[in-house]
Image (cartoon, rainbow, N blue to C red):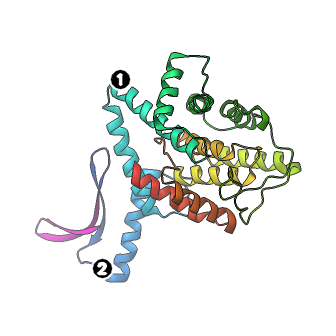
Amino acid sequence: MGIRKKIVKGNEYYYLEETLRLETPKVYSIFLGKKIPDEINLKRKRQELLDKIYGSLLGKQKFLYVTREQLIEVEKRKRRFAVKFKKLGKAKLDEKEEVDTVNFVYTTLTTEGVPITKEDAGLAYKFDQKNIKTIRDENLRVALDMIKGLRYVKESKKGITEDFILKLHQIIMDEYKEKNPGTFRKEQAYIYLKSYEKAEEIRFRPPTPDVLHNKLRELVEWYNTSLGNLNAIELAALLHLRFYMIHPFKDGNKRVSRLLFNKAFLDFGYPMLNISKDTDKYFDALISSVENKDEKPFVQFVFEQFIKYV
């Protein structure tokens, strides 16, 4: 923010201004008067201008763990991304779709211990495009199921339901029949620092099976009520985190969490975000929030990832 002096009919007037680079540069300003206010009043004016900018860009969207300044920065990047996206031709759009999907599937599965390469994920994407039904390689079938799950998310209408979540799990875990795809767990769940190695249980235990339905029903209701009211960063982060803490399935909970995370972004018109790309930081933030029952670390991590990659 800066102070600008204007001379009108020989008189000096001062304005507090901020220029944002959105789709095009836009100047926001408020009138200060004939003199520059003292530091206390200038601080109040800065907050007034910040409120004006936030209201213009994000309306009445609420925020819990992030600041107005952070959300303004998010909105700036989202809008600039949208401008670039609209300029892409079909070939470039198809290429971007493939790259984003392959990277998401590769990162999501390798963090779960599935031994695939990025080339495997790319091959699965091409199989999906050609609608090949028989693939002998198990890892490719798992990757193809993730691609189908992502497509299911992208083609869904706004909002979520319990049936949507069950169907999503059924799609992405179809290769693991012993994990009961599309069915809630009937036993106590335990979360390990590396679940596929079962190395060390974290200091948090998900709810017992008898309360899963109520917990998930509350989460679904919260999401649908918050959609359009809470900002996209926190909506996506909290949906991921709260679903993960419920851990409603025998396996595949993190995979569903990341898909639901992007469901929230897509519902808001935001671009996809490969949230577990920085794997160690992702797990550090996630486990910290879960163990301490403090949502802020994971929300802040999501904000940082959005700023870094969008």
- Marks 1 & 2, CB-CB < 8 Å contact: no
- Tell me the crowding category of disc 2: few under 14, some 14 to 19, or many 20 or more residues within 10 angstroms, Cα based: some
Decide if residue 287 is on the left or right side of residue 180: left
Which span is picked out in magenta? 1-19
Q: Nearer the viewer, mark 1 or mark 2?
A: 1
User: In the rendered image, which residue does mark 2 sit on?
Assistant: 37
Gap between marks 1 and 2, in whole Å?
A: 53 Å
Magenta: main secondary structure equals strand
Front position in the image: 310 or 219: 310
Q: Amino acid at mark 1?
A: Lys
Residue 151: x and y, percent? 56, 29
Q: Quadrant of residue 159?
A: top right
The residue at the point 45 percent across, 52 percent down is 306
The residue at the point 67 percent across, 62 percent down is 290
Farthest-out residue, left: 10
Residue 6 falls inside the magenta stretch: yes
Residue 47 falls inside the magenta stretch: no
Q: Quadrant of the N terminus?
A: bottom left
The reply to whether residue 55 is in sight is yes
Residue 152: x and y, percent? 60, 29
Residue 108: x and y, percent? 56, 43
Front position in the image: 171 or 197: 197
Q: Quadrant of residue 170?
A: top right
User: In the rendered image, which residue does mark 1 sit on?
Assistant: 90
Decide if residue 310 is on the left or right side of residue 63: left
Q: For numbered disc 1, what is the local secondary structure?
A: helix
